[in-house]
Amino acid sequence: MMQSALLAIWQADSGFPNGSFAFSYGMEAIAALRGRFSAQALTDLIESVLRLRWATFDRLLLLRAFRAGDDLAELHTLDRTCEAMTLIESLRLGTRRNGGSFVAAHARLGNPTAARLRDAIAAGDCLGHLPVMQGAIWRSLQFDEPSAQLASGYVTASGMIAAAVRLGAIGALQAQSALQSSLPIIEQLVIEADDAAELSSFLPFIDIAAARHTRADLRLFVN
């Protein structure tokens, strides 16, 4: 259990080179529409993403990939499902690029599962969506399921926080207050989650903002 917790801390660390610095998790488009955030407003936005996208979609894909192990055919099916259910192009390409960077980093660290996934992505046998790649690789690193889910939830929340700070939409200390408030939400969602539920994602405001972002003349982030 202690080793799994340490692995989760390692993978949730913003210093891990997984390419996420280029992705705002929709924050750039939202900030362009509404301007600066208070700590509470940012907490509310993160909670919406965690409850209505992460817990019901990304988390479930991660768990199913985790349980699929080395079954490339199942991982390919999960990848295709993620592709089909992520309607906004910038978000869809973002999770593929982020997943590809995540896989490449682990392959360079000598992880054999990551090396196989990197080759499968290159051959078109997998698309490389981030939650699917996280599930497969974190299983190979001997994570347990709760730690994998907590790491995934934290990466989602902290990625939004980091993007908001870089965009100047909130101060660093206020952002950390929002992140702290998000931690018990992640824990609750992991404890109370229905792992057999159908995949679902319903964040129309973020989808609309992300669609507008693709037409912006100037962008700091890919999405």
Image (spheres, grey):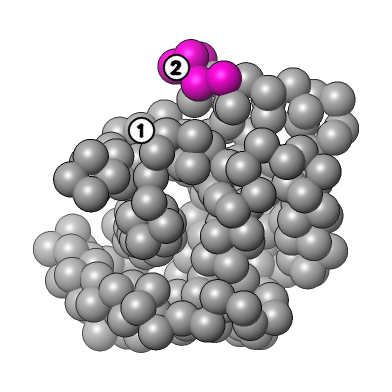
- Mark 2: amino acid: Leu
Left or right: 67 as drawn, with respect to 208: left
- Residue 70: within the magenta? no
Q: Amino acid at mark 1?
A: Phe
Q: Residue at x 59, y 53 (%)?
A: 67
Q: Is residue 68 above or below residue 3?
A: below
Q: For the residue carrying disc 1, how many other residues have a C-alpha within 10 Å: few (<14), some (14-19), or many (20+)? A: few
| Residue 33 at x, y percent in the picture | 53, 77
The boundaries of the magenta stretch are: 108-112
Frontmost of labels 1 and 2 is 2
Report if residue 109 lies within the magenta region.
Answer: yes
Which residue carries the number 2 mark? 109
At x 46% / y 41%, what residue is drawn?
A: 138
Q: Main secondary structure of the magenta part?
A: loop
In the figure, residue 214 lies in which quadrant? bottom right
Secondary structure at badge 1 equals: loop
The quarter of the picture where residue 151 lies is bottom left
Q: Is residue 222 visible?
A: no
Count neighbours of disc 2 (C-alpha within 10 A) and say few if under 14, some if 14 to 19, many if 20 or more: few
Q: Secondary structure at mark 2?
A: loop
Point out which mark residue 16 bears: 1
- The residue depicted at 33 percent of the width and 55 percent of the height is 147
Q: Position of residue 137 (x, y in %)?
A: 53, 37
Quarter of the rendering containing residue 171: bottom left
Q: Earlier in the sequence, mark 1 or mark 2?
A: 1
Residue 133 in the figure: left or right of residue 161: right
State whether residue 203 is above or below residue 64: below
Front residue of 56/43: it is 56
Q: Could one spot residue 101 in this view of the protein?
A: yes
Q: CA distance from mark 1 to mark 2?
A: 11 Å
Q: How many marks?
A: 2
Q: In terms of depth relative to the viewer, which is nearer, 177 or 124?
A: 124
